[in-house]
Image (spheres, grey):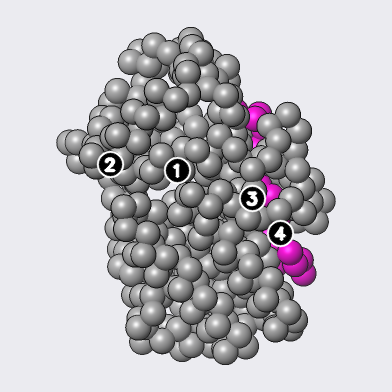
Amino acid sequence: MAHTEPGGTGGLRVVVVGATGNVGTSVVRTLSERPEVGSVLGLARRTPDWQPQKTTWAAVDVEPGGDDLLPHFTGADAVIHLAWKFQPTHDPLTTWRTNVLGSRRVFEAVAGAGVPALIHASSVGAYSPGPKDRTVDESWPTDGWPQAAYCREKAYLERCLDAYEQAHPEIRVVRMRPGFMFKRESAAEQRRIFAGSLIPPQLIRPQFVPAVPDLPGLVFQALHTDDAADAFARAVTLPVRGAFNLAAEPVLNADELGKLLEAKPVRVPLPPLRAALAAAWWLRLVPASPDLFDAVLRLPLMNCARAHEELGWRPTRTALEAIQDFLDGLGERAGMDTAPLAADCGR
């Protein structure tokens, strides 16, 4: 069914697809607090009880054969596309249906409804392997790491959007490429997605982490999810196009993580650790694929100057503060009143 106007307010009408996960909840909250935004329509497979101001909800399936998206998009000033499945990693056809075919349905419906702006959540994972000793800008190739389904799907959608922009020059297309995003309320979800039940959340505390593996290539970028949401909101209200890297300082490595966890960095040979992770994945003890681990070791470091200059965006929290917020959430079994972010209960 189509949405209804929340209170008949004026201002921009924004639709958020995939509005109840880690990024979606922060984007919806941020938009609802912006005076330029009159209404927010959150689309998700399961609607939540959570009710931010100026926000209405609709249950929508973006997969092929799913719901008609046109009634929800008609009259919108912008669509922010965040919907994504990380699991099941053992069934890439399932994630492909949602992540690639579902995204293409969203893109086509944006054009069909005449929405003037599409803001798409790409990722650092779309980038081809790159340097760890310097940063790259948004012109770095986006061919992903082909062995990892997540990277393969993000990179494929970059090609889809290349063609889409050529076919629909009237649509302002923005591609956000954030690093790893963390917040307190996403702790339970991210533990379930990447660690499963193998690592109890109460053990990820400084007193239980004696060492941090110092691996070749384990150098990456992160930011707080709320800071990423601020960039998405700015892309709605500013006349920008193209790709934007998003990350906070400092760049993270074993030394930085060791300080955070009060643990000693220990050099670990990569082959046995990778073999152990692969065995655990094949035995379904952990949900995160070893191919994604390989990709992380190859991700380039991103230069965020374009977001700073064109969006006026600066993260308000450091990368370490973002991870600390996440770790606090793990210890507290934190979550939110949405299906993806449901808190851990006694696990």
Kindly identify which residue carries mark 2.
Answer: 282
- In the displayed image of the protein, which residue is found farthest to the left? 346
**Between discs 1 and 2, the one toward the N terminus:** 2
Q: Cα distance, mark 4 to mark 1? A: 25 Å
Residue 332 screen position, x and y as percent = 31, 33
Going by the image, does 69 lie left or right of 145? left
Q: Nearer the viewer, residue 303 or 148?
A: 148
Horizontal arrangement in the rendering, residue 277 relative to residue 109 (left or right):
left
Q: Residue at x 41, y 75 (%)?
A: 62
Labels 4, 1: front one: 1
Q: Gap in Å between the C-alphas at discs 3 and 4? A: 12 Å
Query: Marks 3 and 2, how far apart in space?
Result: 26 Å
Q: Nearer the viewer, mark 3 or mark 1?
A: 1
Pointer 1 local density, CA inside 10 Å: few below 14, some 14–19, many at least 20: some
What is the CA distance from the residue labelled 3 to the residue labelled 1? 15 Å
- The one nearer the camera, 147 or 308, is 147
The answer, for residue 273, to whether it is visible in the render is: yes
The amino acid on which the numbered mark 4 sits, given as a three-letter code, is: Ala
Q: Residue at x 69, y 50 (%)?
A: 245
Residue, disc 3: 127
Q: In what element is the residue under mark 3? A: loop
Residue 207 in the image: above or below residue 129: above
